[in-house]
């Protein structure tokens, strides 16, 4: 994986970059991620907030309180509506980047499927990666729907 990694929205109005290695790669099956992605799950990586920055444009934020009580701020492009990244109030030291917005997402390999109790019955999950009903112990926090 080359550093820095770059990405952006569908229309190109908002761009970002981060350096270093992600701390966790996941496929989240919570209902919020399903609704946000319009699909069965959201592919994401968690990176240290200190290594992340928006390099162009100003994303719009949508803030929602998760069942846990944490505030989840999702960043979207104000022009095309593409969701780019999120931040969780319980972990201000991390940014969760949506893998599909990376310029080169080909290196992504998920460490786990999370919130699988919310997974859709038509979603075929890879049997070779761990499954968790919530967020895995010892990993960084992901909000539930």
Image (cartoon, grey):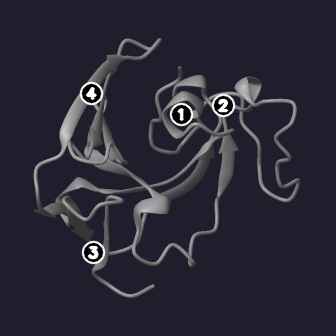
Q: Dot 2 corresponds to which residue?
A: 115
Of labels 3 and 1, the one closer to you: 1
Residue toward you, 34 or 5: 34
User: How far, Cα to Cα, is label 3 from label 1?
Assistant: 25 Å
The answer to whether residue 4 is above or below residue 121 is below
**Would you say 86 lies left or right of 107 here?**
left
User: How far, Cα to Cα, is label 1 from label 2?
Assistant: 10 Å
Residue 95 in percent (x, y) is at 31, 49
Given contact means CB atoms under 8 Å apart, are the residues at marks 1 and 2 in contact?
yes
Note whether residue 20 is visible. yes
**Would you say 67 lies left or right of 4 here?**
right
Q: Secondary structure at mark 1?
A: helix
Q: What residue appears at the point 53 percent right and 20 percent down from the top-left corner?
A: 145
**Would you say 138 lies left or right of 141 here?**
right
Q: Residues within 10 Å of mark 1 (few under 14, many from 20)?
A: some
Q: Dot 3 corresponds to which residue?
A: 19
Of labels 4 and 3, the one closer to you: 4
User: How far, Cα to Cα, is label 4 from label 2?
Assistant: 21 Å
Q: Which mark is residue 62?
A: 4
Given contact means CB atoms under 8 Å apart, are the residues at marks 4 and 1 in contact?
no
Q: Secondary structure at mark 4?
A: strand
Q: Earlier in the sequence, mark 4 or mark 2?
A: 4
Q: Dot 1 corresponds to which residue?
A: 33
Residue 141 in percent (x, y) is at 45, 36
User: How far, Cα to Cα, is label 4 from label 3?
Assistant: 25 Å
User: How far, Cα to Cα, is label 2 from label 3?
Assistant: 28 Å
């Amino acid at each position: 994986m080359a550093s820095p990694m770059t990405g952006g929205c569908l229309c190109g109005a908002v761009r970002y970059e981060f350096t270093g290695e992600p701390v966790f790669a996941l496929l989240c099956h919570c209902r919020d991620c399903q609704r946000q992605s319009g699909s069965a799950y959201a592919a994401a990586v968690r990176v240290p907030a200190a290594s992340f920055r928006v390099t162009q444009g100003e994303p719009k934020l949508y803030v929602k309180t998760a069942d846990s009580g944490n505030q989840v701020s999702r960043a979207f492009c104000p022009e095309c509506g593409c969701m780019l990244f999120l931040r969780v109030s319980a972990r201000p030291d991390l940014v969760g980047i949506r893998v599909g917005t990376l310029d080169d997402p080909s290196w992504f390999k998920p460490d786990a499927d999370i919130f699988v109790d919310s997974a859709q019955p038509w979603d075929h999950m890879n049997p070779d990666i761990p499954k968790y009903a919530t967020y895995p112990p010892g990993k960084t926090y992901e909000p539930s729907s």
